[in-house]
Amino acid sequence: MNDPSTGGTTPELFELPRERKELSPGAVHVPGWLSVAEQRALVRRCREWATGPVPLRQVVLPGGGRMSVRSTVLGRGRSPYRHLRAGGGADAPDVPPWLVELGRRAVREQWGPDTQEARDYRPDTALLNYYDAAARMGMHQDQDEGCAAPIVSLSLGDACVFRIGNTVTRAAPYQDVELRSGDLFVFGGPTRE
């Protein structure tokens, strides 16, 4: 909706509040989890990482195809993400302690502070994906990590549609969720199995 008084669009003005929702067992979407200040700080850091020793790049798949999303990784020596290392073998920066704590906070808040997942959560890798207007990510299951720990996903920037399959067939019926800047998605439990 165009709002002439502000010179921009204000779609949220007439929308119902977006609420926390568990889409499937262990898959939780939390709208607006990051404050605007946290989003800005994280964007600044993402820009640094994107141009660092292992800059953003498009991954070439084993069959020769090129992914449309550009990616980089934080955390050293992670074999599932060796394909993101720079051609010269540069080491990715370590995951900073404040980012580890942000992930822990997300798991504690969504799964409960006394759950096994919250007590054991020790992230050692952060994957940064940059989607421009033409980038897409097909249906897939995050299995390369080699562990069943929850995955914490934070969205920054433009809104997009995220599609999640069911936990039985990983296909239809799907659920579509609009992710906006500041949204949190935690994947764990049966959704990761």
Image (cartoon, rainbow, N blue to C red):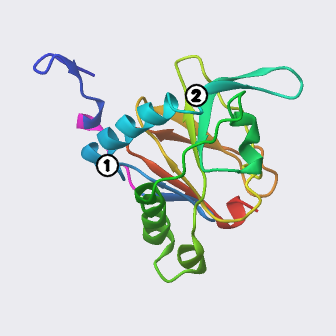
- Name the spot of residue 36 as percent of width and height, x first: 27, 43
The residue that mark 1 highlights is 17
Q: Which residues are magenta?
A: 13-19
Q: Is residue 15 magenta?
A: yes
Please name which of the two marks, 2 or 1, marks the residue nearer to the observer. Answer: 2
Say what secondary structure mark 1 lies in. Answer: loop
Residue at x 48%, y 58% (from the top left corner) = 21
Point out the image quarter for the C terminus: bottom right
In the image: residue 101, left or right of residue 40: right
User: Which quarter of the figure has residue 44?
Assistant: top left
Point out the image quarter for the N terminus: top left
Amino acid bearing label 1:
Pro
Q: Which mark is residue 56?
A: 2
- Name the spot of residue 93 as percent of width and height, x first: 54, 45
Q: Main secondary structure of the magenta part?
A: loop
Q: Residue furthest left?
A: 5
Q: Residues within 10 Å of mark 2 (few under 14, many from 20)?
A: many
Amino acid bearing label 2:
Leu
Asked if disc 2 and disc 1 are in contact, CB closer than 8 Å, the reply is no
Sequence-earlier tag: 2 or 1: 1
- Name the spot of residue 141 as percent of width and height, x first: 74, 48
